[in-house]
Amino acid sequence: MDWGIRNRLSRIFQPQDGRTLMLAVDHGYFLGPTTRLEDPRKTITPLLPYADAIMLTRGILQTCVDPTATVPVVLRVSGGATIVGRDLANETITTSVRDAVRLNASAVALSIFVGSDYEHQTLANLARLIDEATPYGIPVLAVTAVGKELEKRDARYLALACRVAAELGAHFVKTYYCEDFEKVVGGCPVPIVIAGGPKLESDMDVLRLAYDALQGGAAGLDMGRNIWQHDHPVAMIRAIRAIVHEGATPRQAYELLRDLTQASASVGRV
Ligand code: 5RP
């Protein structure tokens, strides 16, 4: 693999264990000021020290992240549809590779909507982005998006979507954890990171999801709402980080979360 691609990937996937904990805060590009991300700077700033990379749009990067921040940026470069529009899958490329270079992105991210009316269009977007980004040594993250059709998230569908992304040349793929997840990993020759999805019912559910995904072969997480919609987001990201990089079990991570949460009660919210 090209030196520039490998170098940028090694900023995101920590060389000591090959894993990553990415913080996803790109949701506003189709959801607007969604709950707890109304003021992105306020949400993002305390979490940055615990994230291996941050996934967001150029608008939020430019307005809400200090340019002196050292966190690697995975720049969301697809969009053009919103939750109130006709079809979330009708995406185009919204940010050029030239702009990604200007913003010192460590990778660019784009959604594909396999099986949707916009399957061809979004796969063509991915192929074009890979053609344009690769000569600059910028890795491409393909996001296997399902829009509002959350029920699509089974191994058969996700294995197909991840494999198609890898076949087109994506350097890593973001998908969902599911039953028989090893089939998804087994059919995908590039690293997989897992989205958290909508907020889960309990903290233990989130920690188990993280643990099971890594046990099942994921190279990391790219999590959003289950971190920053938590009442104690810093405690939650630290607990998840313990699973990703320190070999913690869900139980150990839960105890850490509880201790950090209790400790914060006397000194203010974490
Ligand atoms: C939207 C995205 C989000 O970044 C992704 O869904 C991760 O966030 P969450 O953990 O909240 O699902 O890629 O297409």
Image (spheres, helix red, strand yellow):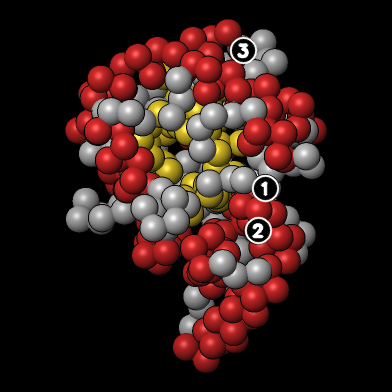
Q: Dot 2: within a 10 Å radius of its alpha carbon, few (fewer than 14), some, or many (20 or more) residues? A: many
Residues at marks 2 and 3 touching, judged by CB atoms closer than 8 Å: no
Q: Which mark is residue 119?
A: 3
Assign a secondary structure to mark 2: helix
Farthest residue, direction bottom: 266
Residue 255 sits above or below residue 263 on the image: above
Please tell me which of labels 2 and 3 falls first in the chain: 3
Q: Nearer the viewer, residue 101 or 64?
A: 101
Q: Residue at x 34, y 46 (%)?
A: 10
Q: Which residue is mark 1?
A: 216
Task: Examine the image and state in which quarter residue 42 appears.
Answer: bottom left
Q: Which x, y percent locates residue 262? A: 59, 86
Q: Nearer the viewer, residue 148 or 191?
A: 191
Amino acid on which disc 3 is placed: Glu
Q: Which x, y percent locates residue 53? A: 39, 50
- Distance between the Cα atoms at labels 2 and 3? 31 Å
Q: Residue at x 28, y 28 (%)?
A: 2
Please tell me which of labels 1 and 3 falls first in the chain: 3
- Distance between the Cα atoms at labels 1 and 2? 8 Å
Please tell me which of labels 1 and 2 falls first in the chain: 2
Task: Examine the image and state in which quarter residue 109 appears.
Answer: top left
Q: Dot 1: within a 10 Å radius of its alpha carbon, few (fewer than 14), some, or many (20 or more) residues? A: some
Q: Nearer the viewer, residue 155 or 51?
A: 155
